[in-house]
Structure formats: C-alpha cells, structure tokens
Amino acid sequence: MPYSSNWQESHNGQPSVIADVQLKYNSLIRQFTASVCISMVTIKEFTDQIQAEILRSFLSDNQIEAILTDEFASAWSPARTLVPIRLQVPDDQTEAAVNLMKEFEDSPIIPELDDV
C-alpha cells in the first residue's frame, strides 16, 4: 500500500466517513466559539479519551466550562498520538482550571477507607 499523507484515508483508499464528520464537527465548534467571542485555551492534551473525559467532568463539576476537541478523531484514528484530544477552557478560567487540574492529579485515585 503506498504511503498516504492523508491520515483520514481508510485501508481501501476512500476517505473515512467518521473522520470527515469529526473534521466538520470540529470546524463548527471553532466557528461557534469564535462567534460568541470566547477565547479557549488548551490546558492539556491526551491520547486516552477516558482520561480526558474524567478530567473534563471533574472541571465541569467545579464550575469550569471545559470542552474536549478532537476526541472522536483520536478514538478512530489508527495513529492516536497524531491527533491528541485537547482539553480546553475559557481564557478567563484558565488559572482556576490549572489549579483544579493539579489538585485532581495529586489526589489519590482510591479514597481512604476512613473517608468512605
């Protein structure tokens, strides 16, 4: 099979429908974000969709408007590390989000028995 610089192509050389839909979705998200004048900042990149969603959920539970971009492209791409999942927050919430993210990453995964 000849090398293709287009990571969206499937094994038979046809464009991947999933990748095409994801690119259109990402474009719409970027347009919407720009239209409401919210400047988004990427605070972390992931290759694992579950880890990205857990942290996004934690931030959302703490009143941070976090979104994931390229989450589906990463899930379906054969080269996951080429399309990282980006966790983004509004520019004015960046400092709070980074502090919460550090707190989350430093916390134990399994609670102590005394805490249960």
Image (cartoon, rainbow, N blue to C red):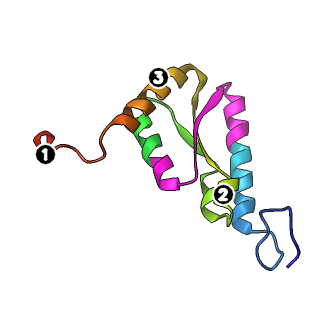
Q: Which one is nearer the viewer's eye here, 90 or 78? A: 78
Q: Count residues near mark 1 (Cα–Cα under 10 Å), then give few for <14, some for 14-19, many for 20+.
A: few
Q: Mark 1 falls on what kind of element?
A: helix
Tell me if residue 101 comes above or below residue 15 in the rendering.
Answer: above
Residue 76 image-quadrant placement: bottom right
| Residue 57 screen position, x and y as percent | 42, 42
Residue sitting at 46 percent across and 22 percent down? 96
Residue labelled with disc 1: 113
Q: Earlier in the sequence, mark 2 or mark 1?
A: 2
Give the residues drawn in magenta, as a range.
29-53
Q: Is residue 29 left or right of residue 52?
A: right
Amino acid at dot 2: Ala
> Residue under circle 3?
96
How far, Cα to Cα, is label 3 from label 1? 29 Å
**Where does the N terminus fall, quadrant-wise?**
bottom right
Q: Is residue 47 left or right of residue 57?
A: right
Instruction: Residue at 64%, 26% (x, y): give it.
Output: 38
Kind of residue at badge 3:
Ala
Considering the image in quadrants, where does the C terminus appear? Answer: top left
Residue 12 position in % (x across, y down): 80, 80
Residue drawn at 60 percent across, 61 percent down: 75
| Residue at disc 2, secondary structure | helix
Q: Amino acid at mark 1?
A: Leu
51 to the left or right of 84: left
Q: Residue furthest left?
A: 114
SS class, disc 3: helix
